[in-house]
Image: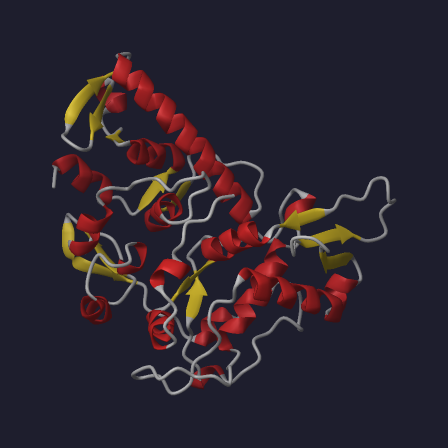
Amino acid sequence: MNQSLLEILDKKEWKLGFAAWIFAGYSPLQKKKNGLIIRLVDEQKIPFGCIEYRAAETAKNEIKNQLGLRIIASRGISQIADSERFERNWLIDIASSVYIAQDNLDVWWNDWACKKHYLPAYLVPGAISDQERLDRGSFSWCTPSSPDDIQDRENPSPDDYGVETYGADAKLKSNSEEVTALFQQRKNAGPVENPIEEKYELYSFFHQIILEQITMVPEKQADIEGVVKHGSSLPSAAVSRDLIIQAAKERDYIAKYWSVWKSKKGGVLQWQKKDVRSDFAETHELSPNILKSRIDDWFQKTDAGIEYDKFFKISKGKFFKPRSE
């Protein structure tokens, strides 16, 4: 593979504009130095101001806008600073698997990068064999310049899941020492705790309710090698919605200030602040598809979770099905 692609894969974090250039098919690493962008497919140098440059910049700006909207909605923030960096693998996942537009972006080098171990296996289902994935783990990867320096975010202990946002009621409720997690939080991808906009104020609560399922032990256990007892699988949008609504009724720190319910049509999760004059009260909502997008943004399956799917014959296609906003 060409040198330009190796250079961008050497960076563990990408700025949003940088990522958008890459997903448009170009490397911007020389742009500030000499006004050139490099076409990734053949390393052709494209000078500033030419027809192809202008077309590439238009595509880059559209991708940047769409990715930015996705990140803003996922994290519950109002804007993204130009200097802010995001985990490279998360941006690739958003672009190639759960992209906001009608069609996912074609990240054509994903398979090659996964096979070379420059991308973790969870990003590119089917790029390597199941045995290779088990041998190296779904989250293991390296950079081209340091192939022996393996970045391996191992499945964390359930003790690491004690995110406490809404008080003592929001604790995990099982014997964590005995439970293998089927899914986990994505690094630096969850909602912020103190958002500026009202519509995002309950996102941390939604996140916490799903998080609690990690060590909830279901009666129906899969036969997974090395696993004595596992927690719940990553819940669907419908299950997540119902869990959120029930918890919002039961937990005083939510019920006192918020009404949370399901719409009569379409199964939409809706919520509204209490004690606000009706003509000023704003109803916020997440459709099932968008709620599932938020869940995909915030959480990912562990290796045990992937094996759980195989045991119960839940197809990869179903889990990784692209979803539009």
Residue at coordinates 34% horizontally, 41% vertically from top-left? 14
Residue at coordinates 14% horizontally, 55% vertically from top-left? 147
Residue at coordinates 73% horizontally, 58% vertically from top-left? 260
**Vertical relation: 162 (above or below) 109:** below
Question: From this viewpoint, is residue 163 visible?
Answer: no
**Vertical relation: 310 (above or below) 203:** below
Question: From this viewpoint, is residue 129 visible?
Answer: yes
Horizontal relation, residue 55 to residue 295: left or right: left
Q: Viewer-proximal residue, 197 or 73?
A: 73
- Give the mark count: 0
Q: Quadrant of residue 204?
A: bottom right
Residue 101: x percent and y percent? 45, 38
Horizontal relation, residue 195 to residue 86: left or right: right
Residue at coordinates 42% horizontally, 74% vertically from top-left? 181
Residue 127: x percent and y percent? 22, 56
Q: Quadrant of the N terminus?
A: top left
How is colour applied across the structure in the image?
secondary structure
Residue 63: x percent and y percent? 40, 32
Horizontal relation, residue 79 to residue 136: left or right: right
Q: Quadrant of residue 37?
A: top left
Residue 183: x percent and y percent? 43, 68
Q: Viewer-proximal residue, 316 or 79?
A: 316
